[in-house]
Amino acid sequence: MEAPPKQEWFWTVPVESRRRAFGQLLYFLLWVAVTGIAAWLTPSPHGHGTHTQLGLAPCPSILLFDRPCPGCGLTTAFAWTVRGRLDLAFESHAMGSLLYLVFTASAWYGFAGWLKRRKWDSGRRLFWAASAFTLALLIYGWVRFALVKEDSPMSIANQVHREFSPHP
């Protein structure tokens, strides 16, 4: 009687030890931390700026140009996505939920691979998939920067306008 064939995993290769796939465990733990932080944060009603609850500075692009950078709204979108509010996540950043869901799926896939002693194949397919997704994210961000004006009350442009406008 022949042994059943080993199950093939998409874009992975077998390894003799879990140590060889330790990076996947770290990636999964990063996802756990990001998910925990996203669940803990209160999403900003402005669609961006949620990250300031972590003590981080407001986005310089909003402050200087009244325009969102490619990453503006991602933290808010992640916070809405973990709450199941994909509509509000989409309003914050159109690619935010997709990015979080890809992150989630790949983290769990990597964790399962680590458990089964399978390492991601670091070949060209994974590189090109990640590159294509990154390029799409950047193109979306650049288009949004060109088309969306935030008119933020915190922006330097609005502060200058208020300072030099005649007061009634």
Image (cartoon, grey):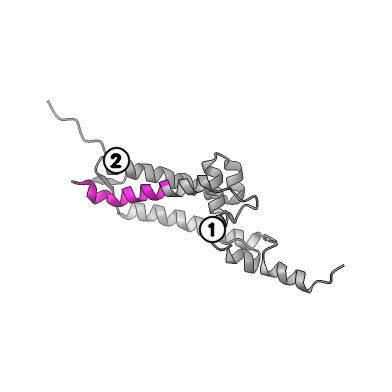
Calculate the distance from the C-alpha at mark 1 to the C-alpha at mark 2.
Answer: 32 Å
Query: Which is nearer the eye, 102 or 123?
Result: 102
- Residue at left 60%, top 58%? 144
Query: In which quadrant of the rendered view does residue 65 lie?
Result: bottom right
**Is 29 included in the stretch rendered in magenta?**
yes
Q: Residue furthest bottom?
A: 164
Query: Which residue is the site of mark 1?
Result: 71
Where does the magenta region start and end?
17-32
Amino acid type at circle 1 is Gly
Determine which of the numbered discs, if any, sits on residue 107 in the image.
none
The x and y percentages for residue 103 are 43, 47
Drawn side of residue 36 relative to residue 157, left or right: left
**Residue at screen point 46% across, 46% down:** 35
Query: Which residue appears at 50% of the width and 55% of the height?
Result: 136
Which quadrant, please, contains the C terminus?
A: bottom right
- Disc with the residue nearer the chain's start (1 vs 2): 2
For the stretch drawn in magenta, what is the main secondary structure?
A: helix
Relative placement, left or right, of 153 versus 39 is right
Q: Position of residue 116 (x, y in %)?
A: 26, 40
Mark 2 lies on residue: 9
Q: Amino acid at mark 2?
A: Trp
In percent of width and height, residue 84 lies at 55, 39
Instruction: Please say whether residue 108 is one of the residues in the magenta stretch.
Output: no
